[in-house]
Amino acid sequence: MKNKYNIAQCLLNERNYSPEEIQSLLRQGETDEEILVHRVPEIVRADARPIRTAVKLAAADGYDDELNIYTKYVELFIEKMQELTHTFSVVSQDLVVTEEPSPAYAVSIRVSGDIDFVGGVIASEPVFLEMARRYSGEEFDRVDDLAIDCCEEFLNVVQGLFSIEMAKRDLEGDLHPPRWKKDVVPQGSRQLRLRVYTSFGSFQIILAVDEFF
């Protein structure tokens, strides 16, 4: 498989592991990647795009017009989590129906033009701080402007690459400045909320066609 996180995603898709078990496996995998490789025989069906499969399962029969776009964004997001924050992460097939523990922080970036799309995250404070730390290499003991900037910068990288991919499909769009807010209940149009599990906790990816806060 192309990346080690694909192994964990296949295992989660086949429901061989509970969310708690998969997070434990991700923690072990970050220390020794061979631990994930040794789980390959447990996979019944090798899936070349397991993240796409997870997003499609979560979306069920909805989001026909948006699904290909949403899927591409999530695949890029998870890929960059590994590349830029050295974090293995996987996407749940179950829609998010609960809010993050307060205080929680939301960051989003909008693209408008031929395509109208907003991608963002909502994370509890400990998870948000760890995301900022892993991206920047800085230590944080509270959510300050620098921590927010780090998470916004990560999203900006993902959204920029996403815009390039969309341009290849002749869908041009302009990037808007990042936005953030504390303790939001997302309410975007055509909104899809996905749970992402990592070694240090979980958070939500929010996908919509307009601002969700």
Image (spheres, rainbow, N blue to C red):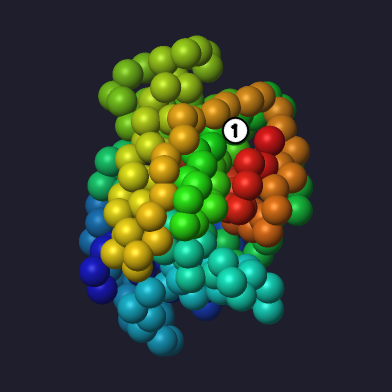
Q: Position of residue 191 (x, y in %)?
A: 67, 55
Classify 10 Å Cα crowding around label 1: few (below 14), some (14-19), many (20 and above): many
Q: Position of residue 79 (x, y in %)?
A: 33, 55
- Residue type beneath disc 1: Ala
**Quadrant into which the N terminus falls:** bottom left
Q: Position of residue 101 (x, y in %)?
A: 70, 33
Between 14 and 107, which is closer to the camera in this rendering? 107
Can residue 81 be seen in the rendering of this structure?
Answer: no
Tally the numbered discs.
1
Q: Position of residue 19 (x, y in %)?
A: 58, 58
**Quadrant into which the C terminus falls:** top right
Q: Residue at x 59, y 72 (%)?
A: 65
Q: Residue at x 68, y 78 (%)?
A: 61
* 29 in relation to 18, above or below: above
Quarter-of-image position of residue 174: top left
Please give the residue where the numbered disc 1 appears in the rendered image: 106
* 149 in relation to 35, above or below: above
Q: Residue at x 28, y 41 (%)?
A: 84
* 178 in relation to 31, above or below: above
Query: Does 183 sit left or right of 84 as displayed?
Result: right
Q: Residue at x 63, y 25 (%)?
A: 181
Quarter-of-image position of residue 2: bottom left
